[in-house]
Image (cartoon, rainbow, N blue to C red):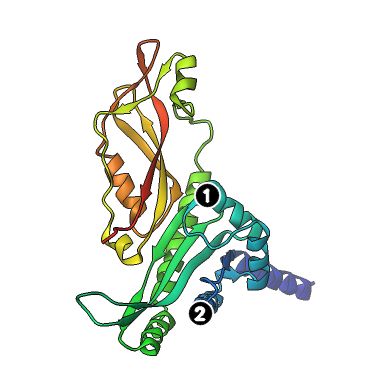
Amino acid sequence: MRRFFLVFGVLIVLFSSLRAQPSHRQISVSVLDFGNTSLGKSAAEQFRIDFRTKREFLVLDSELSRAAAQGIGYSGSLNMSLDEARDLGAAMASEFYLIGDAQTLRRSSSQSPIYYESYCSVFVVSARTGRLVFWDRPSFKNKNERAAVEELSTYLAGHETTQQCLRAIQLAEENESSQRAIVVGISEPLIEEAPDDEKKAAEQGLRLPRPYRRLRPEYPESAARAEAEATVDVVVDVGSDGEVGQIQIARWAGFGLDEATVATVRQMHFFPAMRNGVPIPMRVLLRYNFRKSSK
């Protein structure tokens, strides 16, 4: 009988210690090649290697991820709507994914002799929300092409960008978990979405919101360095007083273009939407097309 109680006591201790150990749920991550160049493929592989060293992440098979992306027609775009981004994540069955572009370009200008630039654009996307949660673009210039490539490769092997990606994913995971935990019973006031065009609005007795003055976002230096050309869509809640409320990115572009767009929209004031002469709140979609300077 004494032996029975001793064994029973040991089992209780073991069971309690197992329950006390934290369970580490792995976050699934896909890494697509950063373009078709050898540099793009090696850069993506470096991120896969780095992520595999972290026990909290599960790196999905690159061949399967590539096949899934090709299967839905993804061709390497770094400018996607939330729906497009979610569709890509769902196809690869990952919670987060990395996409990007890495190349070495021959450059020249009137102020400097010929040189080479090796860069790596890295985008981290949440498959659940479709949001761009992090971007970076390390770049190195050298008059020697091989030296430029080696400088970039050495930098990526130093894991600094990888660490930033990891932190961004962990923060996004925490934020998304918190949002899912919000009590559903507490609902925000409904706001009407604007019809697609003025004609449809008129048929419904509506006048859409109009800005007092149209403001154009600045083309940031970070985008200029990347020679980025993209479209940024934002969904904006305009109150019955014409003031801007919540702003959500509906199509992201990275390279600082999203932030420049949001900063500009926050400065805007509107003539509010009207229904039969009465001001009402309304949700509108604003689109901004960015093109690199012709200089």
> Gap between marks 2 and 1, in whole Å?
26 Å
Q: Can residue 24 be seen in this view?
A: no
The residue nearer to you, when weighing 294 against 287, is: 294
The residue nearer to you, when weighing 229 against 28, is: 229
Left or right position of 20 against 9: left
Q: Position of residue 122 (x, y in %)?
A: 44, 67
Q: Which residue is drawn at 55% across and 47% down?
A: 83
Q: Where is residue 53 in the image (x, y as percent from the top left)?
A: 53, 79
Could you tell me which secondary element the residue under label 2 belongs to? helix
Residue 54: assigned label? none
User: Residue type at mark 2?
Assistant: Gln
Residue under label 2: 46
Residue farthest to the left?
111
The image quarter in which residue 139 lies: bottom left
Could you tell me which secondary element the residue under label 1 belongs to? loop
Q: How crowded is mark 1: few (under 14 residues within 10 Å), some or many (20 or more)?
A: some
The residue nearer to you, when weighing 98 against 19, is: 98
Q: Which residue is drawn at 39% across and 23% down?
A: 208
Image height of 145 relative to 233, above or below: below
User: Residue type at mark 1?
Assistant: Thr
Residue under label 1: 129
Q: Residue at x 66, y 72 (%)?
A: 63
Q: Position of residue 149 (x, y in %)?
A: 40, 84
Left or right position of 88 against 174: right
